[in-house]
Amino acid sequence: MAYAIKQQGDSRSFPSGDPFLGAASDDGEIVVHLGTTFEADASKVAVLVELGTECLGVYTGECAGLEGSNALGFARYRNGDDSPSNLIELVRQPATLESAIDAAKAMFEDAGFDVVVCADQAGRIIDRLVRPKYNAALTFLDEGLATAADMDLTCRLGLGYADGPIERLERGGLEHHHAVTKALFNVYGTPAFAPGRRATVAMQREKREGSA
């Protein structure tokens, strides 16, 4: 299905040169907004907006749990400064048109992505699952439960993970973890989302170096 892209600035999901950008048409049955102002368009099969940690409702509005149209949100999971993964989280609302969901899912799958559909909640699936675990690992490190290397090795060998929590956070950038988990904490108020000390230090250091 042909899709058009409206873009302003860089996209975290599709960095410059990404094949998905190059395959876009001047016009299409689907419109994908990357940093541009969201515009409802009932003439399209689906209208998509790239999300950060915010909800799709920020763009479409909400009404008593009955919201929904041909508009969807999406985010391609990315660990900080790492390259984007192959996973797309496709965000729907309670009354989103099934035809829009099917079209958007098909578009991404045709482009080679793995797609999961989730409700319109801040953090979607992945961040709500993993950020508390990352915060716990940072706390364990501060408490001296184990060294970073030992925790990472335990996760790789004992749990079969590709990498451990500390090495993943430091590779992607602790300041990015702070930004995401702080945004989720502001929404949900759950202590598990409160940024770990080391992430707060990284954020403060980035600000200090940026102002120097």
Image (tube, rainbow, N blue to C red):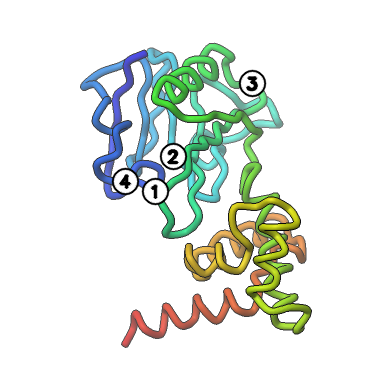
Whichever of callouts 3 and 4 sits on the residue coming sooner in the sequence is 4
The type of residue carrying mark 4 is Pro
Disc marking residue 50:
2
The type of residue carrying mark 1 is Arg
Q: Residue at x 65, y 42 (%)?
A: 125
Which image quadrant is residue 186 in? bottom right
Disc marking residue 15:
4
Q: Residue at x 47, y 15 (%)?
A: 103
Q: What is the C-alpha distance between the residues marked 4 and 2?
A: 13 Å
| Residue 184 placement (x, y as % from top left) | 64, 57
Q: What is the C-alpha distance between the residues marked 1 and 4?
A: 6 Å
Asked if labels 2 and 1 touch by Cβ distance under 8 angstroms, the answer is yes
Which image quadrant is residue 144 in? bottom right
Would you say 171 lies left or right of 57 here? left
Disc marking residue 95:
3
Q: Residues within 10 Å of mark 3 (few under 14, many from 20)?
A: few
Mark toward the viewer: 4 or 2? 4
Whichever of callouts 3 and 2 sits on the residue coming sooner in the sequence is 2
Mark toward the viewer: 3 or 4? 4
Local secondary structure at mark 1: loop
Residue labelled with disc 1: 12
Would you say 212 lies left or right of 156 here? left
Mark toward the viewer: 1 or 2? 1
